[in-house]
Amino acid sequence: MKISLTLNGAPRELDSAPLVRLLDALRGPLGLTGTKEGCGEGECGSCTVLLDGDPVNACLVPIGQCEGRAITTVEGLGEMAHLSPLQRCFIDEGGAQCGICTPGMLISAEALLRRVPDPDEPTIREALAGNLCRCTGYQRIVESVRRAAELLREGAAR
């Protein structure tokens, strides 16, 4: 089956069986390995991507459901030479640890900041609740999101 979608802002097509997991299509034929597989059961959030702007677990979404839809992966947030403010804050504030949960955390935080430009700590924690991290107590991740929100608001004020 030929599937047409928008991936990180660019139109893409791929031939795939409709029940192949979005996660496998991203990491395989689409060549985007930033999205990680943690549990494969929708419990850990490592594979979170945006589907039409909403965070979803890519391990639970069949690629056939993505026909005509927009997907944003962690690669769509920024590039090595031009990181997004959120990505930069995860590095600067110590929110990125081993890297398994980081792509999903970034995508969930991106979805939050698009909806709520000035989130308080409970709001940030709630938005990240579906993403499990085994390395930290989450405080540095929350601080990273809070700092990115500040930078984004400052940039919007200019």
Image (tube, helix red, strand yellow):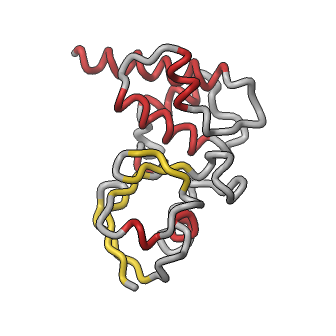
142 up-or-down from 32: above or below: above
39 up-or-down from 54: above or below: below
Q: Position of residue 12 (x, y in %)?
A: 33, 70
State the residue in front, 21 or 146. 21
State the residue in front, 98 or 42. 42
For residue 5, side relative to residue 109 (left or right): left
User: Farthest residue toward the left?
Assistant: 158
16 up-or-down from 80: above or below: below
Q: Position of residue 90 (x, y in %)?
A: 56, 29
82 up-or-down from 71: above or below: above
User: Farthest residue toward the right?
Assistant: 134
For residue 66, side relative to residue 34 (left or right): left
Q: Position of residue 35 (x, y in %)?
A: 57, 54
Q: Position of residue 19 (x, y in %)?
A: 52, 76
Give the residue displayed 46% in from the left and 52% down from the top. Answer: 73
Give the residue displayed 39% in from the left and 56% down from the top. Answer: 71
Q: Quadrant of the N terminus?
A: bottom left
Give the residue displayed 65% in from the left and 42% down from the top. Answer: 101
* Rendering quarter of residue 128: top right
Q: Quadrant of the C terminus?
A: top left
Total count of labels = 0
